[in-house]
Amino acid sequence: MTLPVFRQRSELSEGWIATIAKAALRRPEREFATIVRNVSFRIDEGDRVALLGLNGSGKSTLLHLLTGAYRPTEGSLEIEGSRQALMNISLGFNADATVLENIYLRATAMGMQIGAIQPHIGSILDFAGVAEKAVDRLRTLSAGQRMRLGFAISTSVQHDIMLLDEWIGTGDAEFLKKARDRLQSRVDGSRIVVVASHNLKLVRRLCNRAILLHAGEIKAVGATSEVIAEYRSLMDSRSPDAVASTSSK
């Protein structure tokens, strides 16, 4: 998977004003970077798969490929069944639109038809605790209320395939329990689940398989316990103590 990357070249000048002026006037240069390469795997019905890897290993890019947000620049991707991504739960929101309008906007951004979301509007508002604010502008809601609304919309309908970038872990205690129960219900009802996470306790509890990514390539695929062992070995090799020990030999 190759993506465009815009880099702003900068040069130090004699004064800070000249440095800022050069940076402001110089146009960013577009380069292409290969983020994910030589990746091949199959996920079958019933699988709960963890994506493991250090930061920058390509987990989020691979999830975006699976959601359809990115199209493969090489190779092909086959998906059977409806899919739902719980990644950016504020995608599609407009601060100047009403809460009700934002439910439709978010649902559209998720690829849902208007008719599919309409039966769930009441339960979405109730779950998020914003029923009394349905005709208020989104900007009048607190950050927590917007987060709850996004989560309620994103999990309002059961899908065949669920794609998660970390498990929900923020919010007030009352909502957090509701959210975890809802999320567990959606996971249990999905034919396939893929979750990118650093939480190994969660991965062991939830997943039967795992994929370890490193520098954009698959380093290991298999049973969760085996891949976690590979992941721990990779983390140990990147620790400061390991680097100092290696350098001293």
Image: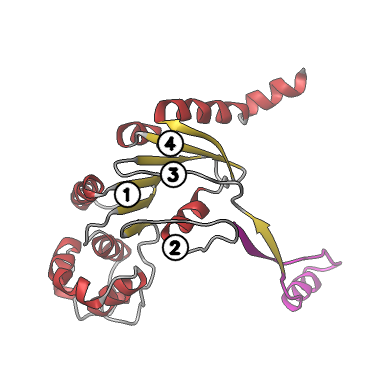
Tell me whether circle 4 and circle 3 mark residues in contact (CB < 8 Å).
no
| Count of numbered marks | 4
- Check whether the beta carbons of the residues at disc 3 and disc 2 lie within 8 A of each other: no
Position of residue 20 relative to residue 70, above or below, is: below
240 is higher (above) or lower (below) than 32: above
**Residue visible at 75% across and 72% down?**
23
Q: Secondary structure at mark 4?
A: strand
Q: Report which residue position mark 4 lands on.
A: 210
Q: Which residues are magenta?
A: 1-29
Q: Nearer the viewer, mark 3 or mark 1?
A: 3
Q: Please, what is the three-letter code of the amino acid marked with disc 1?
A: Ile
Which quarter of the picture shows residue 49?
A: top left
Image-based side of 152 in relation to 11, left or right: left
Residue 89, image quadrant: bottom left
Quote the CA–CA distance across marks 4 and 3.
12 Å
Q: In terms of depth relative to the viewer, which is nearer, 182 or 212?
A: 212
Is residue 232 found inside the magenta-colored segment of the image? no
| Label 2 crowd bin: few (<14), some (14–19), many (20+), radius 10 Å | some
Proximity of marks 4 and 2: CB atoms separated by less than 8 Å: no
Q: Nearer the viewer, mark 4 or mark 1?
A: 4
Which amino acid, mark 4?
Answer: Ala
Q: Quarter of the image for the N terminus: give it.
A: bottom right
Q: Which residue lies at the image location 13% right of the left edge and 70% below the top edge?
A: 122
Label 2 near label 1: C-beta < 8 Å?
Answer: no
Question: Of the residues shown, which amino acid type is indicated by label 2?
Answer: Gly
Which residue position is annotated with label 2?
68
Q: Give the mark nearest the N terminus, 3 or 2.
A: 3
Left or right, 2 with respect to 183, comes to right
The reply to whether residue 169 is in sight is no
Q: Amino acid at mark 3?
A: Arg
